[in-house]
Image (cartoon, grey):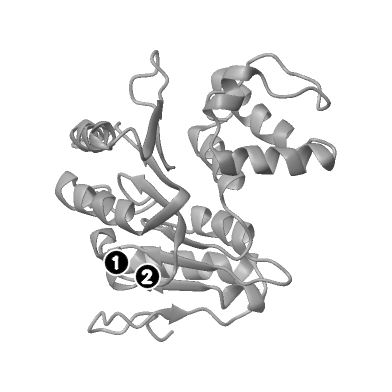
Amino acid sequence: MPPLVHPALSLRPILLRSRRNLLPPLLRRSPSSGPPPLLHRWLPRQRRGLSARASAAGGVEEEEEEDAVVGFVTGKLKATELAHAVWRSIVRKGDTVVDATCGNGNDTLAMLKMVAGERVQGCVYGLDIQESAIESTSSFLKTAVNSREMELVKLFPICHSRMEEIVPKNSPTRLVAFNLGYLPGGDKTIITIPTTTELALQAASRIVCSDGLISVLVYIGHPGGRDELSVVESFASSLPVNTWVSSKFEMLNRPIAPVLILLHKK
């Protein structure tokens, strides 16, 4: 089988062409009632607009997101599922998004389904420093989506700290997502590290557009995981309050459960 990546690791993308409210109410409300005052003030303008459209269509989108938050709080859903629910409230069809650590491609697929529309074409940039992750993502997507959707994905075998080299400057980015740790099913000694993660977060903050989101899921149950969490928390805390909202979801009585940090740009 020919290699998916040029041996020189050039920045030419690998084009895939084969076939196939973060602080919500905990009590459910009826679709016909308006959002509680606190929730309404806290939610970004983008979310409120989506909520209005969802209510007109039967409140399906609102209920889905509330279910995800309640599911996380009650321990029925994982942090990844909560993250995806938040992404769906932010990302629009036709958007540009970045999977900064594509791994085995699960987040890449989720993003692709969010940006691909019948009349508009979004773009998903997938990055991973490990060629095995790029190959795994490629193989997974080939079995999961059609050829038209495949053309919306561009994979690069580079460090996430270099995302500004591949995302066009004239393409406002709605979402940059990170899964920090090691490649599931891969070599557990190869992990993301605080130095490049901090550079990647800085780059993400520069390319993400207004009403956009940086999503960081930090796995802390391995050596170096808590050091990386500390760097992410420090970065999130340093963002100016007039342009960013930083939040954190953590299971306090599960000390090695992944921590979800969400950075919304106003």
Depth check: 223 or 13 in front?
13
Q: Is residue 155 above or below residue 216?
A: below
Please, what is the three-letter code of the amino acid marked with disc 2? Val
Mark number displayed over residue 164: 1
x, y percent for residue 5: 34, 80
Q: Quadrant of residue 263?
A: top left
Q: Are marks 1 and 2 in contact (CB under 8 Å)?
A: yes
Mark number displayed over residue 167: 2
Q: Is residue 135 above or below residue 25?
A: below
The residue at 73%/70% (across/down) is 118
Any part of residue 231 in sight: yes
x, y percent for residue 246: 37, 32
Q: Quadrant of the N terminus?
A: bottom left
Drawn side of residue 74 relative to residue 257, left or right: right
x, y percent for residue 166: 33, 73
Depth check: 191 or 101 in front?
101
Any part of residue 258 in sight: no
Q: Is residue 149 above or below residue 256?
A: below
x, y percent for residue 155: 41, 71
